[in-house]
Image (cartoon, grey):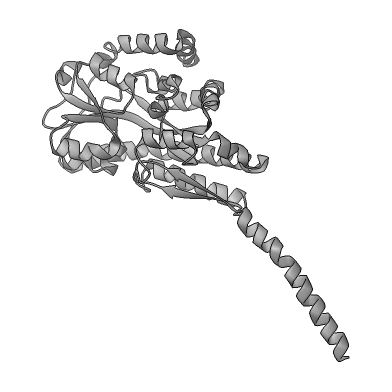
């Protein structure tokens, strides 16, 4: 009887030992990815990246996990785009204007007054036109996963109102590091100053810039209203964002995991869209409550000034895309 029991115990031990390499292999097989963005985790971008990470973990049953690095911990938007391209960062969520640094076609989303409504912008970007634009990144070593939203933009300035383009004459206005933004401010008569987002607060505080052009929620998220007290709700540009991933890293995943990453990016973008309009409206109200003077200029006055910007974009990437986007909104 003892021999039988001992034999059974040995058999059980051998069976358990046989399972150990499998368990170890499963532990090693877990894939961890990193995503970075420049705003706080509670901002619109943070909500999107959180949704992406949660969706990836749920759909992969924990086989893939995404670690979030907010607050520009990994660098500016342009730096993170470069990191994704090099493969030192897996995923980033940035404004599409920053992606335009490597593929100018992405500036289509940033053209002043190109979109008639946020609803039409979202529908077109998530349709065939948006899909074609995303695919342009693949030859550059980047997988375009999907779109997000920061919504409309305005001007926050120090000590003066902007109600017409002439009010910007000679003023130093911070813009993202994109030629289209530079040309837009020039068309309005201002002096554009390309500047990374983490530097904007001190730039306003130290008077090295006279104002900033960005989305309203971004103004409150970075507490810019503490150092600039004049807000112009111009809504001259609608900002889309892009989830991008290093192509080699994407291709290293199984087809099932690739599909999950795509679904998660779309879920993150949809979360951003759901929150963006209200977040920006709440931000405007919050700034006004906290001593910021709010003006709402007639957009038509600004729209008449941006013809040269549209012409520049048209010559940069060809007129067909521009006309296709306009036709899709008729």
For the residue pair 235 and 185, the one nearer the viewer reads as 185
Q: Please, is residue 7 above or below residue 177 in the view?
A: below
Q: Please, is residue 267 above or below residue 238 in the view?
A: below
Q: Please, is residue 54 above or below residue 251 in the view?
A: below
Which of the 4 image quadrants contains residue 314? top left
For the residue pair 87 and 306, the one nearer the viewer reads as 87
Does residue 292 appear anywhere in the picture?
A: no
Q: Which residue lies furthest to the bottom in this view?
A: 2
Q: Position of residue 14 (x, y in %)?
A: 78, 73
Does residue 222 appear anywhere in the picture?
A: yes
Q: Residue furthest left?
A: 159
Which of the 4 image quadrants contains residue 260? top right
Q: Residue at x 25, y 14 (%)?
A: 187
Q: Position of residue 275 (x, y in %)?
A: 41, 40
Left or right, residue 254 beside residue 297? right
Left or right, residue 216 beside residue 268? left
For the residue pair 158 and 203, the one nearer the viewer reads as 203
Q: Where is residue 302 in the image (x, y as percent from the top left)?
A: 25, 16
For the residue pair 64 and 249, the one nearer the viewer reads as 249
Q: Residue at x 45, y 27 (%)?
A: 119
Report the number of numbered marks.
0
Q: Residue at x 27, y 40 (%)?
A: 198
Q: Please, is residue 74 above or below residue 313 in the view?
A: below
């Amino acid at each position: 009887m003892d021999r039988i029991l001992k034999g059974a115990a040995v058999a059980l031990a051998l069976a358990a030992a046989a399972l150990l390499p499998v368990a170890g292999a499963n532990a090693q097989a877990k894939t961890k990815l990193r995503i970075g963005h420049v705003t706080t985790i509670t901002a619109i971008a943070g909500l999107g990246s959180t949704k992406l990470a949660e969706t990836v973990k749920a759909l992969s049953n924990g086989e893939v996990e995404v670690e979030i690095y907010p607050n520009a911990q990994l660098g500016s938007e342009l730096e993170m785009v470069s990191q994704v391209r090099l493969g030192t960062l897996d995923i980033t969520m940035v404004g599409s204007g920053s992606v335009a640094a490597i593929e100018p076609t992405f500036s289509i989303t940033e053209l002043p007054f190109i979109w008639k409504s946020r609803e039409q912008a979202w529908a077109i970007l998530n349709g065939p036109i948006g899909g074609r634009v995303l695919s342009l990144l693949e030859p550059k070593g980047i997988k375009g996963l999907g779109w997000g939203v920061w919504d409309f933009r305005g001007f926050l300035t120090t000590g003066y109102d902007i109600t017409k383009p002439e009010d910007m004459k000679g003023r130093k206005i911070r813009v993202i590091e994109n030629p289209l933004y530079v040309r837009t401010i020039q068309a309005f008569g201002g002096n554009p100053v390309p500047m990374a987002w983490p530097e904007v607060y001190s730039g306003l505080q130290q008077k090295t810039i006279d104002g900033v052009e960005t989305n309203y929620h971004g103004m409150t998220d970075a507490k810019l209203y503490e150092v600039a007290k004049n807000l112009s709700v111009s809504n001259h540009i609608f900002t889309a964002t892009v989830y991008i991933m290093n192509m080699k890293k994407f291709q290293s995943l199984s087809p099932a995991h690739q599909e999950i990453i795509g679904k998660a990016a779309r879920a993150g973008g949809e979360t951003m869209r759901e929150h963006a309009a209200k977040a920006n409206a709440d931000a405007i109200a919050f700034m006004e409550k906290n001593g910021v003077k709010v003006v709402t200029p007639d957009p038509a006055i600004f729209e008449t000034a941006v013809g040269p910007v549209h012409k520049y974009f048209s010559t940069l990437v060809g007129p067909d895309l521009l006309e296709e986007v306009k036709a899709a909104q008729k």
